[in-house]
């Protein structure tokens, strides 16, 4: 893969629990970094424990990742950006943002009009969950049936519980808004905050107890909601085994360099969502590196190394 420029589409978990894979340990999926080559083909780079990842940033700024056309519950097309344009809205150019079916999802429950394929996707069963991250920050969220497990794996939750199964995407988003309004749970936790929390995660027993209490509050709230269209649930999400090490309490250091420029190289150990614990060549310290920062950036893979910073180990 050396000497070729790749556009990073992000980190994805490509197997459900119980689905066998080359590195599957029986209790979770397998993460990959999805890379687009200059001809529009895709390569999936495994991010198994022990993988060495070396790369340099090959272009300034972010580039458009294209858009999606949704045809039904399990059918969609990923349309690459025809202009290979720079990104101006997250990871999309203006044109791809406007024609992307996915952006219409969040207004569907407020009466927004959607294409027939997206409507079919939204009319399938959806799940409502409460997820807790390494510093105790929690959120409420939704996932379509086929992405019930992957949604939480890719978000990097430490512990989570499903609190309702809704008949469709409209009902589940009404419930999500209700929980935010009446229980105070936000619908988003910033990626930077998730990464910072993993430099010193809270004990697992504390996070589990917190998540259990919050899920209980939400279930009690939902039990008093009329109108039907959903069932209150009490089901725990199964975290990927590969994430256990990064979620365990320990003192780590933030990755010392920006991923938007320069050359980088490290060996990946555990991985939670798109956030990895990494070891640098010539250093015994563990660093928390947010690989999600590479999304929509152009990289060139190779035998590169990260400069080891002068870090003073804590005495406490």
Image: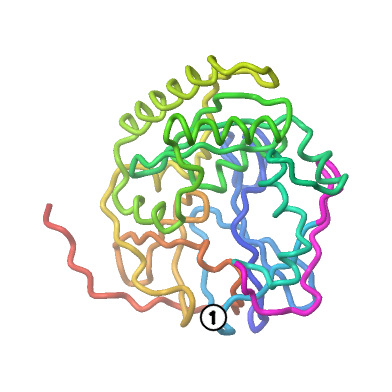
Image quarter in which the N terminus is found = bottom right
Give the x, y percent position of residue 58.
58, 83
Which SS class for mark 1? strand
Give the x, y percent position of residue 102.
72, 53
**What residue is shown with label 1?**
57
Residue in view at x 64 percent, y 18 percent: 231
Residue in view at x 62 percent, y 33 percent: 174
Which class describes the residues within 10 Å of circle 1: few (<14), some (14-19), or many (20+)?
many
Position of 66 relative to 72 (above/below): below
Residue in view at x 68 percent, y 61 percent: 44
Instruction: Compare residues 46 and 314 and report the one nearer the observer.
Output: 314
Give the x, y percent position of residue 315.
11, 56
Position of 207 relative to 157 (above/below): above
Residue in view at x 56 percent, y 57 percent: 47
Q: Residue furthest front?
A: 111
- Name the colouring of the figure: rainbow
275 left or right of 71 in image: left
Q: Quadrant of residue 79?
A: bottom right
Image label count:
1
Give the x, y percent position of residue 274.
52, 55
Q: Is residue 75 a member of the stretch shown in magenta?
A: yes
138 left or right of 309 in image: right
195 left or right of 313 in image: right
Question: The magenta stretch spans which residues?
Answer: 69-89
Q: Is residue 234 a member of the stretch shown in magenta?
A: no
Instruction: Compare residues 17 and 196 and report the one nearer the observer.
Output: 196
């Amino acid at each position: 893969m050396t000497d070729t420029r790749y556009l990073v589409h992000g980190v994805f978990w490509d197997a459900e629990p119980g689905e066998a894979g080359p590195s599957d340990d029986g209790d979770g999926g397998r993460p990959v970094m999805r890379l687009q080559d200059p001809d529009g083909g895709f390569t999936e780079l495994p991010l198994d424990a022990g993988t060495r990842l070396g790369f340099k940033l090959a272009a300034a700024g972010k580039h458009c990742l294209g858009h999606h056309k949704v045809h039904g519950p399990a059918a969609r097309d990923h349309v690459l950006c025809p202009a290979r344009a720079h990104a101006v809205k997250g990871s999309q150019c203006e044109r791809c943002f406007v024609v992307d079916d996915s952006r219409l999802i969040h207004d569907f429950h407020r009466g927004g009009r959607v294409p027939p394929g997206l409507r079919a996707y939204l009319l399938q069963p959806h799940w409502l969950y409460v997820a807790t991250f390494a510093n105790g920050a929690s959120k409420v969220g939704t996932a379509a049936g086929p992405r019930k497990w992957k949604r939480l794996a890719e978000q990097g939750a430490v512990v989570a519980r499903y609190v309702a199964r809704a008949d469709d995407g409209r009902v589940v988003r009404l419930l999500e808004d209700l929980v935010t309004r009446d229980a105070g749970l936000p619908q988003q936790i910033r990626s930077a905050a998730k990464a910072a929390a993993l430099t010193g995660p809270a004990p697992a027993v504390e996070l589990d107890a917190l998540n259990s209490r919050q899920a209980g509050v939400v279930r009690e709230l939902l039990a008093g909601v009329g109108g039907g269209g959903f069932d209150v649930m009490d089901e725990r999400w199964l975290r990927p085994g590969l994430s256990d090490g990064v979620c365990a309490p320990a003192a780590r250091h933030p990755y010392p360099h920006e991923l938007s420029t320069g050359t980088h190289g490290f060996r990946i150990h555990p991985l939670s969502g798109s956030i990895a614990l990494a070891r640098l060549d010539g250093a015994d310290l563990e660093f928390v590196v947010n690989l999600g920062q590479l999304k929509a950036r152009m990289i060139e893979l190779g035998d590169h190394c990260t400069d080891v910073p002068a870090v003073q180990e804590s005495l406490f």
